[in-house]
Amino acid sequence: MEKAFGPPTPPVKKAAARAALVDLKDSSRALLTECFRQFGIESVVTSAGSVDRLRQEKFEACVLNLRAGAENFMDAARTSPSNSRIVLYGIGGNAQEAMRYSKFGINAMFHEPLERPAALKLVRATHMLVLHEFRRYARIPIMT
């Protein structure tokens, strides 16, 4: 009976979500790579000068320091056709720094210096948003 339907098809592997780590210190990069890996998110190291890469490749998340030059990268992310819904993580000291970048819609903030428990807690809280599992974040009532 099984032969009537042909050979079984191999399972399709879903592409892993990717997070761009932009101009981070080695210690921060290692910590965030480990945190994202625990939730099945691949980390890609890039520099702030590689805005063209953002227009050519699809990323589900982006982590960058909130300092001079971050505006260009965030603007390129929000205006890119494939990355306009990217989850932006900022690394900064306080809320006042984050307010300067509010027009770019930063989704989450890591406080410097990065600490493992706090970083893991933030990634755990937002990893479903990175994986585009919106049903946990938006509830739309439907009447049948």
Image: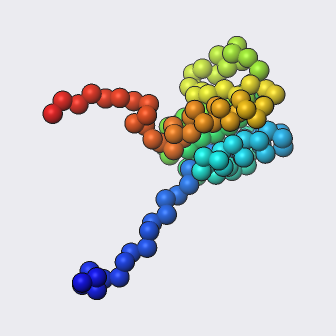
State the quadrant of the N terminus.
bottom left
Query: On the picture, is 23 further left or further right than 101?
Result: right
Q: Residue furthest bottom?
A: 3
Name the residue: 56% across, 39% down.
127
Image location (x, y in percent) of residue 107: 58, 28
Name the residue: 81% across, 28% down.
113
Name the residue: 52% across, 58% down.
15
Q: How is the image coloured?
A: rainbow
Q: Quadrant of residue 94?
A: top right
In this rendering, the answer to whether 12 lies above or below 42 is below
In this rendering, the answer to whether 86 lies above or below 38 is above
Name the residue: 64% across, 51% down.
42
Image location (x, y in percent) of residue 117: 73, 32
Residue nearest the viewer, comparing 86 with 137 = 137
Image location (x, y in percent) of residue 20: 66, 45
State the quadrant of the C terminus.
top left
